[in-house]
Image: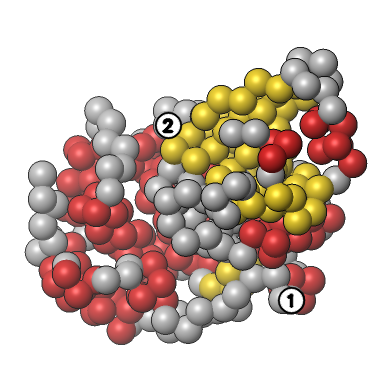
Amino acid sequence: MGLTTMNWQYKSSEVDRLLNTHDLEIAAIDAGMEATVYKVWSTKLDIGFALKLWNKRNPPDVAKQYHLLEKLREMGHSVSKPYAWGRNSKGEFVLLTSYDGKPLPFDLEAGSAQTVAHLLASIHSADVRLLKGLVPQFDDFVNYFFPELSAHTDIAAVLHNIVGDIEIRTDRFIHGDFNLGNILEYEGKFTVIDWTNAQLGDSRYDFAWASFLILLYSGPRCYEAFVKTYTNRIPLDAKEIYNFEMMACLRWIWLSRIAPIPKHKDTVTRLKQFIDHHRELQEVSLMY
């Protein structure tokens, strides 16, 4: 993974300084479903970077993602600083950003859950007019978040009943995959990463995906702290939370069928408890 051989479409002056140090340490730190992430460290400059390489799935518009990060930082959001984007020798897209630490642990503390809620509420409160041309808008909610759902008829049947009772909105800026793995912590600062799914969409789903995952992995105490903090800033009624968290649960079950996703000590127990309290989900197979 040589930075000097990259075909940079844009790079900042900091990257030129980095390339001239000749003391770079590069190590893979994450292998997600769509890309591989590397930590790039210069001992001489005492500074770290993160290099994201889209080598598994079709990449997003990386140039737009670069400019989105610039705009979000300008708006005061806690996101990575972008430094460069381009392609490697294989033509695969790369994005170089600041190194912002490690993902939050699953055993989250209530105070951290409150901070996470504030981060998400701030994203959903963004002035969408300032993001014109930088994020897409999709009309088909189900097809975007549940592609190829026809192979999972049990999930599809329940999902379509839920969606039939709701009017899906596309009026707020959303992250699209807000979860603890996409929130980094470094020296007490939290940074939201992975904006591949950012769009104008339904903030209630974005919230529910986060709240359901916090319940599943961090437990009810953190869940309650997250929900209370978020809804104090952006009110939601109980029916909205109920319906959208059911959709989040369906998406987790769907993902568990097509990819290896984390299942910790209490994950399955909490999942079954959630389903016990949502009778509409009880016909869906967990396939364990």
The x and y percentages for residue 208 are 43, 58
Q: Callout 2: helix, strand or loop?
A: loop
Q: Is residue 233 above or below residue 114?
A: below
Q: Quadrant of residue 149?
A: bottom left
The x and y percentages for residue 156 are 21, 73
**The C terminus lies in quadrant:** top left
| Residue under numbered circle 1 | 132
Q: Is residue 203 above or below residue 88?
A: below
Q: Amino acid at mark 1?
A: Lys
* Label 1 crowd (10 A; few <14 / some 14-19 / many >=20): few
Instruction: Between residue 127 and residue 8, name the one nearer to us.
Output: 8
- Residue 185 in view, yes or no: no
| Residue under numbered circle 2 | 106
The x and y percentages for residue 38 are 57, 33
Residue drawn at x 10%, y 57% as measured from the top left: 285
Q: Is residue 100 above or below residue 178?
A: above
Residue drawn at x 61%, y 65% as measured from the top left: 61
- Residue 103 in view, yes or no: yes
The x and y percentages for residue 226 are 51, 45
Q: Is residue 68 above or below residue 102?
A: below
* Label 2 crowd (10 A; few <14 / some 14-19 / many >=20): some
The answer to which of marks 1 and 2 sits earlier in the sequence is 2
The residue mark sitting in front, 1 or 2, is 1
Instruction: Between residue 165 and residue 155, name the one nearer to us.
Output: 155
Position of 249 with respect to 187 (left or right) is left
Instruction: Between residue 197 and residue 171, name the one nearer to us.
Output: 197
Position of 282 with respect to 28 (left or right) is left
Q: Amino acid at mark 2?
A: Phe
Instruction: Between residue 84 and residue 275, name the one nearer to us.
Output: 84
Q: Callout 1: helix, strand or loop?
A: loop
